[in-house]
Amino acid sequence: MNVSLNWLKEYVDIDIQSDALVNKFNLMSAEVERLEKMVTASNLVVGQVKTCIKHPDSDHLHICTVDIGTSVLPIVCGASNVDTGQKVIVALDGALLPGNLLIKKSKIRGVESNGMICSLDELGIEHKYHQENGIHVLPSSSEIGIDAIKALHFDDEVIELHLTPNRGDLLSMIGVAYDVSAMIETKMHLTEPQITEIKEKNRVNVSTSTAGCMSYYARVIKNVKIQDSSDWLKARLIAAGVRPINNIVDITNYVMLEYGQPLHAFDFNKIATTEIIVRDALPKETFVTLDGKSRILNEDDIVITNGKKVIALAGVMGGLDTEISEATVNVLLESATFNPIRIRKTSKRLDLRSESSIRFERCLDPNRTIKALNRACMLLESIASGSTLSGVAFFDNNDLSAKAIPFSSAQITKVTGYNYQGNEIESVFQRLHFEYNRDGDQFVVFAPTRRPDIATYQDIIEEVVRIHGFQFIPVTMTKLPSNGFLTPKQQLRRMIRNTLVFLGLDETLTYSLVSEVAAIEFDKKAKSVVRLLHPMAEDRRCLRHSLVPSLLDVSAYNTARKADRIALFEIGKGYTQTEETEFVAGIISGTFQESLWQGKKEVVDFFLVKGLLQALFDRIGVGNVKYQIPKNPFPKLHPNINACIMKDEVSIGWVGKLHPAEQTKRGLSDTYIFSLAFEKLFSCSSRNFVMQSISKYPAVTRDIAIVVDKTVSAEMITSLIRKNGKKILNEVKIFDLYQGENIRPDQKSIALNLTFQDYTKTLETDEIDEITKRIVSCLEKELKATLRI
């Protein structure tokens, strides 16, 4: 909301400087985005062009003599529309225009020029507000020699307020005036609009068939004259950020800014009937709005009709067929209230956000509906020479009474910690212009209809605190029932994050909103998709099911920028219509580790990723994890390089290499990905770690190599070895896999390192040999293995 200070001062006495008022707003009302002068140019006066001839050495310059009251100056002007007799804006020698343009005496192609005749663009007024080409011509009644900024009514300062959704009352100058009056404790000056009705009666009938229109008032004004608005009215609109159009439209916009009540003016002759019927739109009904676009409506929209056809889209935009034009003579003026939720849905769906729709969405003051209408009629009479027909056509189903809210000083003391006295609270209500009744420390406050945001005693507390002053609230330490701590799930989440970072991965955060293709990209079976009704963009339409597509996008982005090492993970959620699932997912590719000094590189492969996952499982206490060939692998994974991660016959995740075709499509090198279900990790993790002293007895190692069938998994071999190794077998490591010479094609050779240790004694060689022999014998019997010599 842009607030003109000159305009504001018409409603409330302001006896402090602009900077001090800004501070008051920031502390007590709404945040101020900016405070600036409407025009910063200096040393400008009103002049009159006495003579205007073409420059002898130019095909577009003119040599003018301009009377500025105290003297007549020669000025060379390049505007095509400059002419004799015009009243113009003159920048004198020493004037400073926006952009630090300093005006000084000079010679232009041999002719002396003592100033500059200005356009509004050169004063810093954006072109969208005037759409003039060339210099600005002032009214012929303008006084020569006076300050041109004052003549244009641009001698103003503008405060831009950043409003929260609940403060719709500040979308009007009168609403801002109420707040300023409360903040600085000064008087307000509000008058009731006075109109002069002629004898001819207003014969329009208004009715509604929809609950979406709570009230509708209509007046008819005859014999209006369409013309440009006066400079003061244009200046008020420009200060508010509204483009002047013509006097009729400008009046409706002016009153909207003044009262916060949107109005709409119809060309009454084009309506062609005396019936105004408000109803719900029909499914697939079409309507051409003022911008010339055909809109397809639905039953959630509210329309204004003449009993036969739609003439306006309620609360959003009027119709092309009934717009005000230069030929308009008679005007039907509308002032109404509509369901704010339905107006918001319509404006958002049709992408027709406007100053009017914004105000309808935030709830209007129903008591201002008729006041705003009468104020507009008053201006139409004085500015557009119109005649107001007697009588108002209307219906009004609004509750126009103030809302009674019980409240006590004990309540505010309990909430704030400050012991407010009764007279302090009364003072705040008086400053806010709230009516109230008091009985001791008990109050009944009557919240006016202009403040729909005040509904409970908590809202009353907020009003008292902000107007009385936040500085009175005592500063105290927050009292907590107990010391803070992390929940078990938070602890696990932090442990996973710290472990993966320690292992060399970087955490990333990606959007939960993705395209519909990405949402289902890594689904094994069909799942419901959650779609947004109004997405920011097509690639942010759906909630994802998996983190993997987002990680792939991040990897592709970094790879395209020559990153040769990708090691990322994310802890986040996937969503369906019925549930949210938390995942721990990662993506790794390229060189994982390298030593330039030693000339060594460790390139990422399946076993490296498996080792990282095993380190994670060891750290969070998830033991006996198995990697199985999946029965139904993901189609976007390599068919022979992927595994299902199992814990006690329950799948807790998967790991694998991205399919070569998918890698080529995304511009990736060999890429490995994993995804773990956080809830399953939590349910099977054991975080009760037991410290164990270092054994004072030495460990003994034995290496064996066995030949087994290719179908025998490493997990089957290690499990069998651990089973027969008794308690003294501490660790089993596979350090070699061989297939080649002297090994049959259907077989493979696996070399294992066995570590034995007893914490109570030194192990004897014979004892180790016996256990090793038993292990080899079991492998021969169970897996048909042969010891490789």
Image: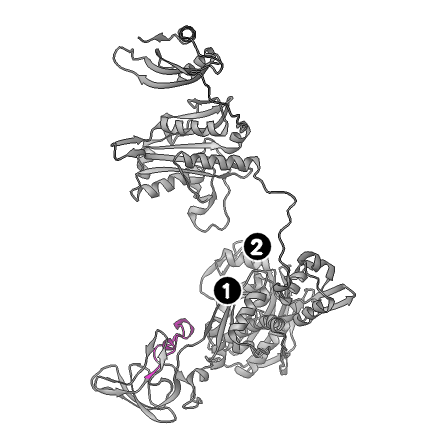
Q: Could you say which disc has been placed on residue 761 in the image? A: none
On the question of residue 653 being in view, the answer is yes
Element type at mark 2: loop
Instruction: Please state which amino acid type lies under the numbered disc 2.
Output: Glu
Numbered disc in front, either 1 or 2: 1
- Residue 176 in the figure: left or right of residue 665: right
- Between disc 1 and disc 2, whose residue precedes? 2
* Residue for badge 1: 354
Vertical order, 614 against 318 (above or below)? above
Q: CA distance from mark 1 to mark 2?
A: 21 Å
Where 18 falls versus 673 (above or below)? below
**Residue 661: % across, % down:** 32, 33
Q: Which residues are magenta?
A: 116-134
As helix, strand or loop, the secondary structure at mark 1 comes to loop
Q: Is residue 49 left or right of residue 111?
A: right
Q: Residue furthest front?
A: 696
Find out whether residue 10 is within the magenta segment: no
- Which residue was labeled with disc 2? 299
Within-10-Å neighbours for mark 2: few <14, some 14–19, many 20+: few
Magenta segment: does it hold 133? yes
Question: Going by the picture, which residue comes out furthest to the right?
Answer: 439
Residue 576, x across and y down, in percent: 52, 38
**Position of the C terminus by quadrant:** top left
Q: Amino acid at mark 1?
A: Ser
In this view, 125 is above or below 114: above
Q: Quadrant of residue 390?
A: bottom right
Numbered disc total: 2
Q: Who's the residue at 29% across and 81% down the image?
A: 78
- The location of residue 12, given as percent across then percent down, is 60, 77
Residue 405, horizontal then vertical, whole percent: 72, 62
